[in-house]
């Protein structure tokens, strides 16, 4: 039996909108605001962020926080806030065709959810 699709979940950064470094900026703001940036040189941390792009933010921050899950949870929440701030400050630009593709999915009766990789 084939189950029909009902839901499509799309990542935003780099998939539906141009990233232009917003994710990296949000990681840096969150790390600075929560003290996670003090645990290793930022260049090394940024390299790890780039290598793990697309993975769970809590997992990335757990590594950056040397295994401190409470600090990672605070940094993840700070990341969400920082991401929203940067988008409000700088705006975002659609990847050409993304809106039409999303509308096509919706017209086909699918529910479309956009995510930033940490929460829908």
Image (tube, grey):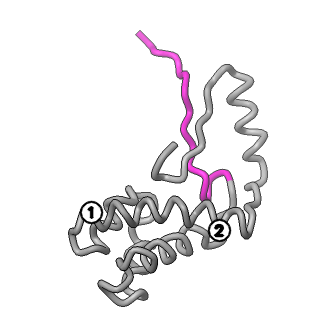
Task: Measuring from the top left, give residue 75's x and y in whole percent.
Answer: 39, 66
Task: Measuring from the top left, give residue 5's x and y in whole percent.
Answer: 53, 22
Of 8 and 80, which appears nearest the observer?
Answer: 80
Mark 2 / mark 1, whichever is N-terminal: 1
On screen, 91 above or below 47? above
Of 95 and 88, which appears nearest the observer?
Answer: 88
Which label sits in the foreground, 2 or 1? 1
Location of residue 109 (image quadrant): top right
Residue 18 image label: none
On screen, 71 above or below 44? above
Residue 86 image label: 2
Q: Which residues are magenta?
A: 1-16
How far apart, in angstroms, are the residues tagged by discs 2 and 1?
24 Å
Task: Measuring from the top left, give residue 42's x and y in whole percent.
Answer: 41, 86
Magenta region, main secondary structure: loop
Q: For mark 1, what is the residue?
A: 70
Which element carries disc 1, helix, strand or loop?
A: helix
**Residue appearing at x 39%, y 74% in the figure:** 34
On screen, 1 above or below 66? above
């Amino acid at each position: 039996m084939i189950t029909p699709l009902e839901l499509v979940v799309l990542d935003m950064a780099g998939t539906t909108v141009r990233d232009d470094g917003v994710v990296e900026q949000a990681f840096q703001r969150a790390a600075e605001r929560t003290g996670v940036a003090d645990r290793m040189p930022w260049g090394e941390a940024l390299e790890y962020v780039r290598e793990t792009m697309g993975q769970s933010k809590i997992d990335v921050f757990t590594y950056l926080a040397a295994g401190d899950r409470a600090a990672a949870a605070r940094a993840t929440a700070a990341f969400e806030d920082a991401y929203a701030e940067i988008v409000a400050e700088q705006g975002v630009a659609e990847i050409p065709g993304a809106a039409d593709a999303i509308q096509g999915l919706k017209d086909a009766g699918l529910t479309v959810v956009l995510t930033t990789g940490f929460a829908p």
